[in-house]
Image (cartoon, grey):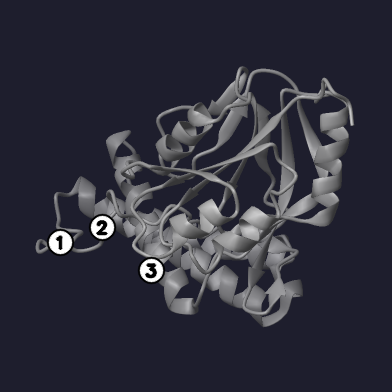
Protein backbone atom coordinates (compact mmCIF):
# COMPACT_ATOMS: atom_id res chain seq x y z
CA UNK A 1 0.00 0.00 0.00
CA UNK A 2 1.47 3.33 -1.06
CA UNK A 3 2.00 5.69 1.89
CA UNK A 4 1.00 8.62 -0.31
CA UNK A 5 -2.16 7.06 -1.71
CA UNK A 6 -5.25 9.32 -1.64
CA UNK A 7 -7.51 8.89 1.36
CA UNK A 8 -11.13 8.00 0.66
CA UNK A 9 -14.28 9.11 2.48
CA UNK A 10 -17.57 7.26 2.03
CA UNK A 11 -20.81 9.18 2.53
CA UNK A 12 -24.30 7.78 3.14
CA UNK A 13 -27.59 9.60 3.81
CA UNK A 14 -30.21 7.83 5.91
CA UNK A 15 -33.71 7.88 7.35
CA UNK A 16 -34.99 4.84 9.27
CA UNK A 17 -32.63 2.39 7.57
CA UNK A 18 -31.85 0.11 10.52
CA UNK A 19 -32.77 -2.99 8.53
CA UNK A 20 -30.47 -2.21 5.60
CA UNK A 21 -27.68 0.08 6.75
CA UNK A 22 -25.44 -2.55 8.35
CA UNK A 23 -24.75 -4.37 5.09
CA UNK A 24 -24.11 -1.09 3.31
CA UNK A 25 -21.53 0.03 5.88
CA UNK A 26 -19.89 -3.42 6.00
CA UNK A 27 -19.22 -3.12 2.26
CA UNK A 28 -17.45 0.20 2.88
CA UNK A 29 -14.93 -1.08 5.42
CA UNK A 30 -12.03 -0.42 3.01
CA UNK A 31 -12.67 3.33 3.11
CA UNK A 32 -10.62 5.59 5.37
CA UNK A 33 -13.72 7.30 6.77
CA UNK A 34 -17.49 6.87 6.64
CA UNK A 35 -19.81 9.83 7.16
CA UNK A 36 -23.53 9.18 7.72
CA UNK A 37 -25.94 12.12 7.50
CA UNK A 38 -29.28 11.19 9.05
CA UNK A 39 -32.51 13.16 8.69
CA UNK A 40 -34.10 12.29 12.04
CA UNK A 41 -34.43 8.51 12.19
CA UNK A 42 -36.66 7.09 14.90
CA UNK A 43 -35.21 3.58 14.73
CA UNK A 44 -31.70 2.28 15.46
CA UNK A 45 -30.13 3.71 12.30
CA UNK A 46 -27.73 6.08 14.08
CA UNK A 47 -26.70 3.45 16.64
CA UNK A 48 -25.91 0.97 13.87
CA UNK A 49 -23.89 3.59 12.00
CA UNK A 50 -21.81 4.38 15.08
CA UNK A 51 -21.30 0.68 15.80
CA UNK A 52 -19.71 0.39 12.34
CA UNK A 53 -17.36 3.26 13.12
CA UNK A 54 -19.16 5.90 11.07
CA UNK A 55 -19.24 9.56 12.01
CA UNK A 56 -22.94 10.44 12.34
CA UNK A 57 -24.40 13.87 11.69
CA UNK A 58 -28.09 14.79 11.94
CA UNK A 59 -29.57 17.33 9.53
CA UNK A 60 -33.21 18.07 8.59
CA UNK A 61 -34.03 16.71 5.16
CA UNK A 62 -34.47 19.41 2.52
CA UNK A 63 -33.86 17.41 -0.65
CA UNK A 64 -31.83 14.44 -1.84
CA UNK A 65 -29.21 16.48 -3.68
CA UNK A 66 -28.77 18.94 -0.83
CA UNK A 67 -28.47 16.18 1.76
CA UNK A 68 -25.88 14.29 -0.28
CA UNK A 69 -23.85 17.40 -1.00
CA UNK A 70 -23.88 18.32 2.67
CA UNK A 71 -22.45 14.88 3.46
CA UNK A 72 -19.71 15.44 0.88
CA UNK A 73 -18.83 18.79 2.43
CA UNK A 74 -18.54 17.26 5.91
CA UNK A 75 -16.09 14.58 4.79
CA UNK A 76 -12.46 14.84 5.85
CA UNK A 77 -10.95 13.66 2.56
CA UNK A 78 -11.35 14.96 -1.00
CA UNK A 79 -12.03 11.65 -2.73
CA UNK A 80 -15.65 10.65 -2.07
CA UNK A 81 -17.55 7.40 -2.52
CA UNK A 82 -21.25 8.26 -2.20
CA UNK A 83 -23.80 5.52 -1.54
CA UNK A 84 -27.42 5.20 -0.47
CA UNK A 85 -28.26 3.00 2.50
CA UNK A 86 -29.87 0.41 0.23
CA UNK A 87 -26.71 -0.05 -1.86
CA UNK A 88 -23.65 -2.25 -1.34
CA UNK A 89 -20.23 -2.38 -3.02
CA UNK A 90 -19.70 -5.85 -4.49
CA UNK A 91 -16.33 -7.63 -4.32
CA UNK A 92 -15.35 -6.83 -7.90
CA UNK A 93 -16.13 -3.14 -7.51
CA UNK A 94 -14.23 -3.03 -4.23
CA UNK A 95 -11.19 -4.46 -5.99
CA UNK A 96 -11.47 -1.98 -8.85
CA UNK A 97 -11.65 0.96 -6.43
CA UNK A 98 -8.61 -0.28 -4.52
CA UNK A 99 -6.62 -0.56 -7.75
CA UNK A 100 -7.56 2.99 -8.73
CA UNK A 101 -6.72 4.30 -5.27
CA UNK A 102 -3.26 2.68 -5.35
CA UNK A 103 -2.70 4.43 -8.69
CA UNK A 104 -3.69 7.76 -7.14
CA UNK A 105 -7.06 7.95 -8.94
CA UNK A 106 -4.97 9.24 -11.84
CA UNK A 107 -7.30 8.18 -14.65
CA UNK A 108 -10.21 10.50 -14.00
CA UNK A 109 -11.92 13.15 -11.88
CA UNK A 110 -14.81 10.77 -11.32
CA UNK A 111 -15.78 7.14 -11.83
CA UNK A 112 -19.12 5.64 -12.78
CA UNK A 113 -20.32 2.15 -12.00
CA UNK A 114 -23.18 -0.10 -13.04
CA UNK A 115 -25.96 -0.60 -10.49
CA UNK A 116 -27.88 -3.87 -10.31
CA UNK A 117 -31.24 -3.74 -8.54
CA UNK A 118 -32.76 -6.71 -6.73
CA UNK A 119 -36.44 -6.98 -7.57
CA UNK A 120 -38.64 -9.61 -5.93
CA UNK A 121 -36.21 -12.49 -5.98
CA UNK A 122 -33.75 -11.65 -8.74
CA UNK A 123 -31.38 -8.94 -9.89
CA UNK A 124 -32.71 -7.23 -13.00
CA UNK A 125 -30.20 -7.34 -15.85
CA UNK A 126 -32.19 -5.88 -18.73
CA UNK A 127 -34.71 -3.18 -19.62
CA UNK A 128 -34.64 0.30 -18.12
CA UNK A 129 -33.23 -1.09 -14.86
CA UNK A 130 -29.75 -2.08 -16.03
CA UNK A 131 -26.91 -1.15 -16.24
CA UNK A 132 -28.19 2.09 -14.61
CA UNK A 133 -24.68 3.57 -14.44
CA UNK A 134 -24.06 6.11 -11.68
CA UNK A 135 -21.16 8.45 -10.99
CA UNK A 136 -20.50 7.77 -7.31
CA UNK A 137 -16.71 8.03 -6.85
CA UNK A 138 -15.26 11.49 -7.42
CA UNK A 139 -12.85 14.21 -6.40
CA UNK A 140 -14.97 16.81 -4.60
CA UNK A 141 -12.50 19.53 -5.64
CA UNK A 142 -13.68 18.95 -9.20
CA UNK A 143 -17.33 18.06 -8.70
CA UNK A 144 -20.11 16.83 -6.49
CA UNK A 145 -23.90 16.82 -6.20
CA UNK A 146 -24.40 20.05 -8.12
CA UNK A 147 -27.34 21.96 -9.59
CA UNK A 148 -30.80 22.79 -8.33
CA UNK A 149 -32.58 19.52 -9.03
CA UNK A 150 -33.40 17.71 -5.79
CA UNK A 151 -35.07 14.74 -7.48
CA UNK A 152 -33.20 12.31 -9.77
CA UNK A 153 -30.10 14.05 -8.48
CA UNK A 154 -26.79 13.28 -10.18
CA UNK A 155 -23.17 13.85 -9.30
CA UNK A 156 -21.05 15.55 -11.96
CA UNK A 157 -17.38 16.45 -12.30
CA UNK A 158 -15.22 18.79 -14.34
CA UNK A 159 -12.86 16.44 -16.09
CA UNK A 160 -12.59 12.89 -17.36
CA UNK A 161 -14.99 10.17 -16.18
CA UNK A 162 -13.99 6.50 -16.25
CA UNK A 163 -16.06 3.34 -15.75
CA UNK A 164 -15.20 0.82 -13.04
CA UNK A 165 -15.65 -2.94 -13.15
CA UNK A 166 -18.07 -4.47 -10.67
CA UNK A 167 -21.46 -3.32 -9.48
CA UNK A 168 -23.36 -1.47 -6.82
CA UNK A 169 -25.89 -3.99 -5.52
CA UNK A 170 -29.17 -2.15 -4.95
CA UNK A 171 -31.98 -3.40 -2.69
CA UNK A 172 -34.51 -0.60 -3.18
CA UNK A 173 -37.83 -2.08 -2.01
CA UNK A 174 -38.90 -3.80 1.17
CA UNK A 175 -42.24 -4.80 -0.36
CA UNK A 176 -44.54 -4.03 -3.29
CA UNK A 177 -46.44 -1.49 -1.18
CA UNK A 178 -43.12 0.15 -0.33
CA UNK A 179 -42.39 0.52 -4.03
CA UNK A 180 -45.81 2.01 -4.75
CA UNK A 181 -45.42 4.53 -1.92
CA UNK A 182 -41.99 5.52 -3.21
CA UNK A 183 -43.33 5.83 -6.75
CA UNK A 184 -46.13 8.15 -5.65
CA UNK A 185 -43.72 10.34 -3.69
CA UNK A 186 -41.24 10.49 -6.55
CA UNK A 187 -43.98 11.30 -9.03
CA UNK A 188 -45.14 14.21 -6.84
CA UNK A 189 -41.62 15.57 -6.41
CA UNK A 190 -40.89 15.27 -10.14
CA UNK A 191 -44.17 16.98 -11.03
CA UNK A 192 -43.46 19.85 -8.64
CA UNK A 193 -39.95 20.24 -10.06
CA UNK A 194 -41.25 20.24 -13.65
CA UNK A 195 -44.03 22.70 -12.79
CA UNK A 196 -41.54 25.09 -11.16
CA UNK A 197 -39.49 25.03 -14.37
CA UNK A 198 -42.51 25.87 -16.51
CA UNK A 199 -42.97 22.45 -18.10
CA UNK A 200 -46.47 21.40 -19.07
CA UNK A 201 -48.36 18.14 -19.34
CA UNK A 202 -50.97 17.26 -21.94
CA UNK A 203 -53.54 14.54 -22.43
CA UNK A 204 -51.38 13.12 -25.20
CA UNK A 205 -48.37 12.91 -22.89
CA UNK A 206 -50.47 11.21 -20.22
CA UNK A 207 -51.29 8.44 -22.71
CA UNK A 208 -48.18 8.14 -24.86
CA UNK A 209 -45.47 8.83 -22.26
CA UNK A 210 -46.20 5.83 -20.02
CA UNK A 211 -46.88 3.61 -23.05
CA UNK A 212 -43.52 4.52 -24.59
CA UNK A 213 -41.72 3.92 -21.29
CA UNK A 214 -43.21 0.43 -21.08
CA UNK A 215 -42.46 -0.38 -24.74
CA UNK A 216 -38.89 0.92 -24.56
CA UNK A 217 -38.00 -0.90 -21.34
CA UNK A 218 -39.90 -4.15 -21.67
CA UNK A 219 -39.60 -4.78 -25.41
CA UNK A 220 -36.82 -2.71 -26.99
CA UNK A 221 -34.38 -3.05 -24.08
CA UNK A 222 -35.20 -6.66 -23.32
CA UNK A 223 -36.97 -6.30 -19.99
CA UNK A 224 -38.98 -9.42 -20.86
CA UNK A 225 -35.77 -11.42 -20.37
CA UNK A 226 -36.08 -10.79 -16.61
CA UNK A 227 -39.26 -12.87 -16.44
CA UNK A 228 -42.21 -11.92 -14.25
CA UNK A 229 -40.18 -9.41 -12.16
CA UNK A 230 -39.21 -7.66 -15.39
CA UNK A 231 -42.87 -7.37 -16.40
CA UNK A 232 -43.94 -6.04 -12.99
CA UNK A 233 -41.09 -3.55 -13.00
CA UNK A 234 -42.03 -2.27 -16.46
CA UNK A 235 -45.67 -1.84 -15.39
CA UNK A 236 -44.80 0.03 -12.20
CA UNK A 237 -42.32 2.41 -13.86
CA UNK A 238 -44.92 3.19 -16.52
CA UNK A 239 -47.36 3.87 -13.67
CA UNK A 240 -44.85 6.31 -12.15
CA UNK A 241 -44.55 8.15 -15.46
CA UNK A 242 -48.35 8.38 -15.69
CA UNK A 243 -48.60 9.65 -12.10
CA UNK A 244 -46.05 12.36 -12.84
CA UNK A 245 -47.94 13.52 -15.96
CA UNK A 246 -51.31 13.58 -14.16
CA UNK A 247 -49.93 15.48 -11.18
CA UNK A 248 -48.22 18.01 -13.43
CA UNK A 249 -51.46 18.56 -15.36
CA UNK A 250 -53.34 19.12 -12.09
CA UNK A 251 -50.73 21.58 -10.84
CA UNK A 252 -50.77 23.64 -14.00
CA UNK A 253 -54.57 23.85 -13.86
CA UNK A 254 -54.68 24.80 -10.19
CA UNK A 255 -56.36 21.57 -9.13
CA UNK A 256 -55.73 19.83 -5.77
CA UNK A 257 -53.07 17.14 -5.77
CA UNK A 258 -52.50 16.59 -2.06
CA UNK A 259 -54.96 15.95 0.74
CA UNK A 260 -55.57 19.37 2.37
CA UNK A 261 -55.27 17.68 5.77
CA UNK A 262 -51.64 16.78 5.07
CA UNK A 263 -51.41 14.07 2.46
CA UNK A 264 -48.14 12.65 1.23
CA UNK A 265 -45.20 14.42 2.80
CA UNK A 266 -41.98 15.16 0.99
CA UNK A 267 -40.38 17.38 3.61
CA UNK A 268 -38.00 16.96 6.50
CA UNK A 269 -38.98 13.41 7.36
CA UNK A 270 -38.83 12.08 3.80
CA UNK A 271 -36.92 8.81 3.41
CA UNK A 272 -33.41 9.51 2.26
CA UNK A 273 -32.98 6.61 -0.12
CA UNK A 274 -36.06 6.74 -2.31
CA UNK A 275 -35.33 5.68 -5.87
CA UNK A 276 -37.94 3.87 -7.96
CA UNK A 277 -35.47 3.68 -10.89
CA UNK A 278 -37.98 5.75 -12.82
Q: Which residue is mark 3?
A: 181
Q: Nearer the viewer, residue 116 or 38?
A: 38
145 to 183, vertically: above or below: above
> In the rendered view, would you say 81 is above or below 203?
above
Helix, strand or loop status at disc 3: helix
Report the residue at 69% width, 67% height from top. Answer: 219
Across and down, in percent, residue 215 comes to 61, 64
**Marks 1 & 2, CB-CB < 8 Å contact:** yes
Task: Please give the label number shown on residue 265.
Answer: 2
Q: Inspect this view and state whether residue 94 appears.
A: yes
> Is 221 displayed left or right of 77 in the figure?
right
Please give left or right for residue 188 compared with residue 127 in the image.
Answer: left
Label 1: how many Cα within 10 Å (few below 14, some 14–19, many 20+): few
Percent of width and height locating residue 192: 30, 45
Dot 2 falls on a residue whose secondary structure is: loop
Q: Which mark is residue 262?
A: 1
Looking at the image, tell me whether mark 2 or mark 3 is earlier in sequence order: 3
Q: CA distance from mark 1 to mark 3?
A: 15 Å
The percent position of residue 208, horizontal first and vertical second, equals: 47, 59
Identify the disc placed on residue 62. none
Question: Where does the N terminus fall, quadrant-wise?
Answer: top right
Q: Are marks 2 and 3 in contact (CB under 8 Å)?
A: no
**Compared with residue 147, is residue 267 higher up or lower down, i.e. above or below?**
below
Whole-angstrom CA distance, mark 1 to mark 2, is 7 Å
In the image, farthest residue toward the left = 261
Query: Image quadrant of residue 170?
Result: bottom right
Is any part of residue 202 visible from this angle?
Answer: no
Residue 152, image x, y percentages: 49, 45
Marked residue nearer the N-terminal end (1 or 3): 3
| Label 1 secondary element | loop
Amino acid sequence: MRPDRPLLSATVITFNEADRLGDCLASLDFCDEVVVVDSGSTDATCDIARAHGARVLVRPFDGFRSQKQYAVEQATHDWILSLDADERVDARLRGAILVEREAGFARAAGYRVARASEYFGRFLRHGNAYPDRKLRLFDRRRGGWRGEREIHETATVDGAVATLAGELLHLPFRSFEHQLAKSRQYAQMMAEHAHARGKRASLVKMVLGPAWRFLRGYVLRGGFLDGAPGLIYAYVTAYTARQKAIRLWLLQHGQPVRDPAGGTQTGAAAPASIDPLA
